[in-house]
Image (tube, grey):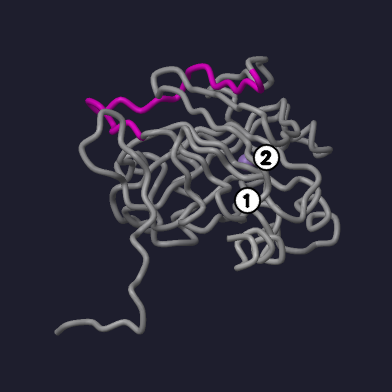
Amino acid sequence: MTMSYVFDPPAPPSVAMAGGGGRFPVRRIFCVGRNYAAHAREMGKDPDREPPFFFTKPADAVVDSGAIVPYPPETSDFQYEIEFVVAIGREGFDVGREAALDLVFGYGVGIDLTRRDLQLEARDKGRPWDWGKAFDQSAPIAPLHRVNGGRHPAAGRIWLALNGVVKQDADLTELIWPVPDIISILSRSMVLKPGDLVMTGTPAGVGTIVAGDKVTGGIDGLGEIGIAVGKPIARRSQRVVRNGPESE
Ligand code: MN
């Protein structure tokens, strides 16, 4: 049977693999909120060991390292959050903590780009976080590293620098909920499938970025990521002026 679509479906969003050899097709992006105590405090919340909470980004929010990410619309407080990223490679539902790492395909470094003003307004009004978190190009992710010899990183420096000045500097041991717990808990609510990504939360030191800024970061053993912040996307009205017949 040949499937027919009313228009050509877009290519699946994907993330590069370290060392090449194909790309990781992205299915969904789950993000953990407040998973480092010092960051919970800087967001005005008490760190606690209540179950982790999640939000999502659309799969096509992924961006390769090296990209210029345009300054997003509707915000005046665009922020970076460096994150440890887990790539799921096997299906699992209601998986126990001890078996959770069997689902992992690999790991990487990502940035949870955030429209902080929209997120906090939504948080304070009890509204969804989507407009603060799930916008276009909000998930830069560096090339993923396959699980190698059954070794799963549980410790190592995680850092981010803005224009060369280190702003976030922590260790994966500081995760309130480590990866086996996150996967186990997430899998009670969703059937996890190959292609799912989990961004595991950011340490303290988040801050604002503007057009022209360069953001770099890394995790020990998982390489580095770098993006630049570009000018805002031109509005349609501006495009008409710039690309209209009178300007050609
Ligand atoms: Mn985050």
Residue position marked by numbered label 2 in the rendering = 34
Is 42 within the magenta? no
Q: Is residue 170 left or right of residue 17?
A: right
Q: Position of residue 132 (x, y in %)?
A: 71, 53
Q: Nearer the viewer, residue 148 or 224?
A: 224
Q: Report the amino acid beneath label 1.
A: Phe
Residue position marked by numbered label 1 in the rendering = 53
Position of residue 47 relative to residue 237, above or below, is above
Quadrant of the snapshot with the C terminus: bottom right
For the residues labelled 1 and 2, the Cα–Cα distance comes to 8 Å
Query: Which mark identifies residue 151?
Result: none
How packed mark 2 is, by other alpha carbons closer than 10 Å (few <14, some 14-19, many 20 or more), is many
Q: Is residue 2 left or right of residue 155?
A: left
Q: Secondary structure at mark 2?
A: loop
How packed mark 1 is, by other alpha carbons closer than 10 Å (few <14, some 14-19, many 20 or more), is few
The residue positioned 66% from the left and 23% from the top of the image is 162
Q: Is residue 242 left or right of residue 116?
A: left
Quarter holding ligand 1:
top right
**Location of residue 57 (image quadrant):** bottom right
Q: Report the amino acid beneath label 2.
A: Arg
Q: Main secondary structure of the magenta part?
A: loop
